[in-house]
Amino acid sequence: MALALSLELALATLLVLLPLGLWMGRWLARARFVGKSLVEAAVVLPLVLPPTVLGYYLLVSLGAASPLGAWMLEHFNIRLTFNFLGLLIASVVFNVPFMVQPIQRAFEAIPANLTEAAAVHGLSRWQTLWRVELPLAWPGILSAAVLTFVHTLGEFGVVLMVGGNIPGETKTIAISIYDRVQAFDLQAADRMALLLLVLSLVAVAASFFAAARTVKR
């Protein structure tokens, strides 16, 4: 149950964050404006903040006592914390650097003369994106997607702060491992930790293999 919930959360996070990451990563790679360093610092911030600090601020911002949380509860009867939706929002926030940074670097590595040549040959911006930029940036996009998926599976601090430990709703496999260790059930903890290790290793290895095949082609 905990593994299924973690996989569902990782997949939902990927589906929400991938389009946003593509847009933001390409924008940061191409744009030149005052304050860009500040925006890039904000993107990286979830990576350097302690998970409990990030989780605390998300809990304060989304909880029923916050303006946003109270408004959502009053008008739509939707709680933003201690449920799967809260987990998803938190997961999207703490995975922003894992998604955006590799995509940004991938787009930055594309020579500007290629996109200029595409424009000269009559390709529109969308055609250039689909036929030139995305194929070249694909290894970075794939790495970002895999990093986001694997990081979601193993995240503990933010998930616990925002979602709590509700079996079947917010109790992910990382929290289950912690619970088993607290209960001195080390055999169960070993099994779950090994499963998470194998899943993460297979996902990362598959992404490296696919990226290498793409570069070779």
Image (cartoon, rainbow, N blue to C red):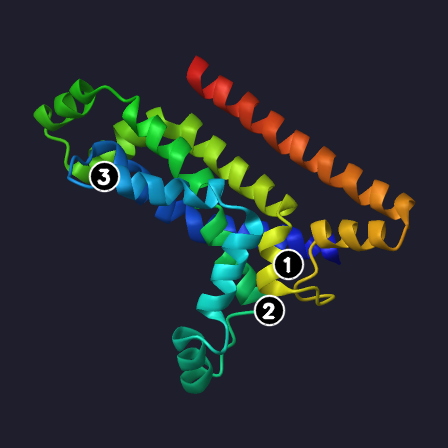
Quadrant in which residue 198 is drawn: top right
| Residue 143 position (above or below residue 34) | above
Q: Are marks 1 and 2 in contact (CB under 8 Å)?
A: no
Provide the secondary structure element on which disc 3 rests.
helix
Q: Answer yes or no: do the residues labelled 1 and 3 have beta carbons within 8 Å?
A: no
Residue that appears at 60% across and 56% down: 159
Q: CA distance from mark 2 to mark 3?
A: 35 Å
The residue nearer to you, when weighing 209 against 77, is 77
Q: Which residue is mark 1?
A: 160
Q: Which residue is pictured at 58% across the width and 41% down the height?
A: 151
- What amino acid does circle 2 point to? Asn
Viewer-side label of 1, 2: 1
Q: CA distance from mark 1 to mark 3?
A: 32 Å
- Helix, strand or loop for disc 2: loop
Q: Say few, some or many: other residues with alpha carbon within 10 Å of mark 1 (under 14 / 14 to 19 / 20 or more).
A: many
Which dot marks residue 36?
A: 3
Q: Tell whether 28 sits left or right of 21.
A: left
Residues at marks 1 and 2, CA–CA distance in whole angstroms: 11 Å
Residue on which the image places disc 2: 83
Binning the other alpha carbons within 10 Å of mark 2 as few (below 14), some (14 to 19) or many (20 upward) gives: some
Pinpoint residue 192: horizontal percent, then vertical percent. 80, 44
Task: Give me the residue at 16% from left, 18% from top.
Answer: 113
